[in-house]
């Protein structure tokens, strides 16, 4: 199921694309605005007997902010709360991408104070056309819960910059970083983790 607009999408509803009772995987859903996206609704893509499905959000540049309440009126476009992300990860994998952004820079910025915690075997993927500026804390207590960070996916180059206060050490399913440049302060809590795979060239560590 795809909900898409040439300029702005505002989505307040619910999507259900679940697997069957005895067989079948959860479905795929996309909610996108070519420039802007406001989303408060969710997609239930779970499966009892198969693999859970995935929700794709594909707006312009994205800010992930602290908060569980619905956005103020007028709402902040392309601003997604950590509480919304936590809820969605209970119902399927989630990818937020700016690789096709046409409204503003193709960046993803995670603000200070963000805390995202999930107990399911779901993957949170942040795919930036250009840069990811990562702050906040992340915790996935299920062995299959994972975090994927992809930068520079519009082929114009990109940098992952991790703040001094970011902490991904509690992501038990591992963290994968793919892209061009990675800047990680030495004080950042990236370890211990079962798996940290970094595959850009080069990797830059800064104090």
Image: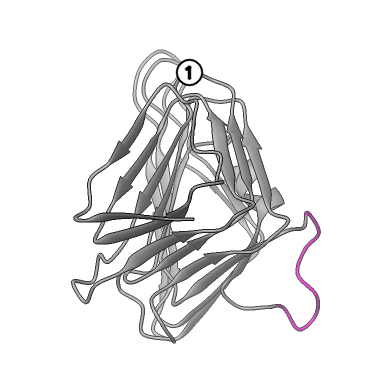
**Quadrant where the N terminus is found in the figure:** bottom left
Residue at image coords 53%, 67%: 109
Rendering quarter of residue 68: bottom right
User: Does residue 55 lie above or below 39 as drawn?
Assistant: above
- The secondary structure that dominates the magenta segment is loop
Residue 102 belongs to magenta span: no
* Left or right relative to 114: residue 110: left
Residue at image coords 48%, 18%: 143
Where residue 33 appears, as percent x and y from the top left, is 44, 75
Rendering quarter of residue 154: bottom left
Seen from the viewer's position, the closer of residues 154 and 199 is: 199
Residue at image coords 42%, 27%: 19
* Left or right relative to 5: residue 204: left
Color style of the picture: one colour
Badge 1 density bin: few <14, some 14–19, many ≥20, Cα 10 Å: some
Asked if one can make out residue 3 in the rendered structure from this viewpoint, the answer is yes
Residue 74 belongs to magenta span: yes
Where residue 199 appears, as percent x and y from the top left, is 22, 45
Disc 1 target residue: 143
* Left or right relative to 72: residue 187: left
Seen from the viewer's position, the closer of residues 141 and 134 is: 134
- Outermost residue toward the front in this view: 207
Rendering quarter of residue 160: bottom left
User: Does residue 24 lie above or below 166 as drawn?
Assistant: above
User: Does residue 27 lie above or below 160 as drawn?
Assistant: above
- Provide the residue span drawn in magenta: 68-75
Query: How many numbered callouts?
Result: 1
Task: Look at the numbered disc 1 and give the secondary structure of its residue.
Answer: loop
């Amino acid at each position: 199921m795809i909900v898409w607009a040439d300029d702005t999408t505002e989505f307040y509803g619910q999507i259900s694309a679940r697997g069957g009772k005895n067989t079948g995987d959860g479905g795929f859903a996309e909610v996108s605005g070519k420039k802007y996206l406001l989303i408060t609704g969710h997609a239930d893509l779970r499966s009892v007997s198969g693999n859970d499905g995935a929700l794709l959000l594909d707006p312009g540049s994205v800010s992930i902010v602290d908060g569980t309440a619905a956005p103020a009126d007028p709402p902040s476009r392309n601003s997604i709360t950590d509480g919304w992300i936590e809820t969605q990860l209970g119902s399927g994998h989630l990818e937020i991408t700016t690789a096709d952004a046409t409204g503003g820079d193709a960046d993803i910025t995670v603000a200070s104070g963000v805390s995202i915690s999930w107990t399911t075997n779901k993957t949170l993927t942040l795919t930036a056309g250009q840069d990811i500026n990562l702050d906040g804390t992340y915790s996935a207590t299920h062995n299959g819960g994972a975090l994927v960070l992809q930068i520079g996916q519009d082929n114009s180059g990109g940098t992952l910059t991790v703040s001094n206060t970011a902490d991904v050490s509690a992501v038990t399913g591992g963290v994968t970083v793919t892209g061009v440049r990675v800047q990680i302060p030495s004080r950042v809590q990236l370890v211990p983790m079962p798996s940290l795979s970094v595959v850009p060239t080069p990797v830059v560590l800064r104090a």
